């Protein structure tokens, strides 16, 4: 089997001395289980090398272009964990017809407690199965558009559902304002001038404060599309009854963000 390894940097391609910093892009391959690699023909690509907190649209476009150039549909992407949920959602919506797994590590892989090698081996196992789709390998295998960003314990959570995929699509970056609700939120702090879309997270019960609804109305009056986002399949509290037509259900914020920056091709 032919497998392309695309390295973008991240902790899985880093080492630690005084601090954690970028090192060799493909070293995870050298630590992989030989029983998994003996019948694999690897090829390698490294469109850029960054710590993933520095991910932006130009880097994302470079990754997309690298995938498009690939001579095989079997691809493992080495990525940092900080923005993994965002990148994985983009890749899941753009390349759902390929066999792709994104993976990362919680620590540099020379650390014996790191999960990077087990994550990489699990990515290999999944690729070898030959199933179409985009997944994330990080302490388990998850559909790539259903994970939220890692929490303070380095745990990714699977939630929501995979959305209907675009038939043909390309990146179409927009200026998106993302808002997280909190007690006593003051929407006067948000400037919508030049904003293309507002995505507003909901509380875990699929609720938002009343002031959010007034801000949503203001945005719509100014021609700015506004959407509340929840991984739940319904909003059952009376406080959400009058905004049902503005809610994106069954979606992580990361996947809603990705889809808002993707346009179907003619």
Image (cartoon, rainbow, N blue to C red):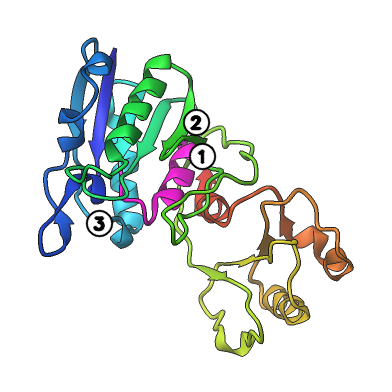
Using a 10 Å C-alpha cutoff, classify the residue at mark 1 as few (fewer than 14 neighbours), some (14 to 19) or many (20 or more): many
**Circles 2, 3 touching at the beta carbon (< 8 Å):** no
Give the residues in magenta.
79-95
Q: Residue drawn at (51%, 36%), measured in percent from left and top?
A: 142
Q: Main secondary structure of the magenta part?
A: helix
Where disc 3 sits, the SS reads loop
Could you tell me residue 33's position as x and y percent?
24, 22
Using a 10 Å C-alpha cutoff, classify the residue at mark 2 as few (fewer than 14 neighbours), some (14 to 19) or many (20 or more): some
| Residue 235 seen by the camera | yes
Tell me the residue that label 2 is attached to: 96
User: Upstream in the sequence, badge 2 or badge 3?
Assistant: 3
164 vs 204: above or below: above
**Circles 1, 2 touching at the beta carbon (< 8 Å):** yes
Q: Residue drawn at (49%, 45%), measured in percent from left and top?
A: 89
Tell me the residue that label 1 is attached to: 93
Front residue of 208 and 59 = 208
Q: Which mark is residue 51?
A: 3
43 vs 60: above or below: above
192 vs 200: above or below: below
Where disc 2 sits, the SS reads loop
Residue 90 among magenta residues: yes
Q: Please identify, in this view, whether the residue under mark 2 or under mark 3 is nearer the observer.
A: 3
Left or right position of 30 against 251: left
C-alpha distance separating marks 1 and 2: 6 Å
């Amino acid at each position: 089997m032919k497998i392309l390894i695309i390295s973008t940097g991240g902790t899985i391609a880093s080492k630690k001395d005084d601090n954690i910093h970028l090192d060799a892009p493909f070293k995870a391959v050298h630590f992989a289980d030989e029983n998994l690699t003996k019948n694999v023909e690897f090829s390698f690509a490294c469109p850029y090398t960054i710590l993933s907190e520095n991910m932006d649209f130009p880097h994302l476009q470079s990754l997309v272009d690298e995938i498009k150039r690939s001579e095989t549909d079997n691809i493992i992407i080495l990525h940092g964990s900080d923005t993994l949920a965002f990148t994985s959602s983009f890749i899941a919506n753009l390349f759902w017809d390929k066999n792709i797994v994104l993976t990362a590590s919680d620590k540099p892989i020379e650390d014996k407690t790191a999960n990077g090698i087990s994550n990489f081996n699990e990515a290999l196992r999944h690729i070898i199965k030959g199933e179409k789709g985009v997944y994330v390998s990080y302490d388990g295998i998850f559909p790539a558009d259903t994970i939220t960003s890692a929490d303070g314990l380095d745990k990714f959570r699977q939630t929501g559902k995979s959305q209907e995929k675009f038939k043909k699509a390309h990146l179409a970056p927009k200026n998106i304002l993302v808002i997280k609700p909190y007690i006593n939120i003051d929407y006067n702090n948000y400037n919508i001038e030049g904003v293309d879309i507002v995505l507003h997270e909901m509380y875990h019960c699929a609720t938002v404060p009343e002031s959010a609804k007034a801000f949503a109305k203001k945005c719509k009056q100014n021609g700015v599309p506004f959407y509340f986002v929840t991984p739940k399949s319904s909003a059952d509290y009376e406080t959400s009854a009058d905004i049902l037509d503005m809610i994106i259900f069954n979606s992580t914020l990361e996947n809603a963000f990705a889809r808002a920056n993707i346009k179907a091709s003619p």
